[in-house]
Image (cartoon, rainbow, N blue to C red):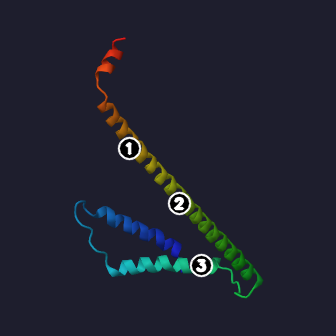
Amino acid sequence: LDLSSSLPSQIETCAQTSVSLTTGQPTPPTTPEPVSAVSSAKSSPRKMGREKGKKSVDRFSVEYRQRRERNNIAVRKSRDKAKRRNLEMQDKLIELSAENEKLHKTIEQLTRELTGLRDFFKQIPSAPFAGSESR
């Protein structure tokens, strides 16, 4: 069964079908026959390709065990790295939250000082300031 020659003809047929549709009208639903033919043609080469490209490796072979072990190590390493990154982010969050709280307290303190100074200067008569400006 030569699927490589039927695939271009299917693509050409699909291209002609889509071009012949007038614009502005909804696309009609496809009939079940072409869909099943296309999906079977698509799935068959994949299955065949997988079987052809797949090495017949016994699950109990040394090569398979080595690949699995390397993969398991890589997975552990990746998960450990993600956990480390998560912990670093949590530490940074705690640090920045503490700094943010400290800054808010500083703002409150400076606001209180500013309010006190404003009240203080409101109580002082304005005459001495007028004299100092004329110098």
48 or 76, which is in the foreground?
76
Left or right: where 54 falls relative to 47: right
State the residue position of label 1.
Answer: 112
Quadrant in the picture for the C terminus: top left
Q: CA distance from mark 1 to mark 3?
A: 74 Å
Q: Quadrant of the N terminus?
A: bottom right
| Residue appearing at x 75%, y 80% in the figure | 63
N-term mark: 2 or 3: 3
Q: Secondary structure at mark 1?
A: helix
Residue at x 44% of width, y 69% of height: 9
Q: Could you tell me which secondary element the residue under label 2 belongs to? A: helix
Between 118 and 23, the one lying in front of the other is 118
Kind of residue at disc 1: Arg
Q: Specify the label residue 94 is tagged with.
A: 2
Q: Which residue is mark 3?
A: 50
Residue type, label 2: Ile
Residue plotted at (54% across, 77% down): 46
Camera-side residue of 8 and 100: 100
Contact check, label 1 and label 3, Cβ < 8 Å: no
Q: Locate residue 109, reporting x and y percent.
A: 42, 45
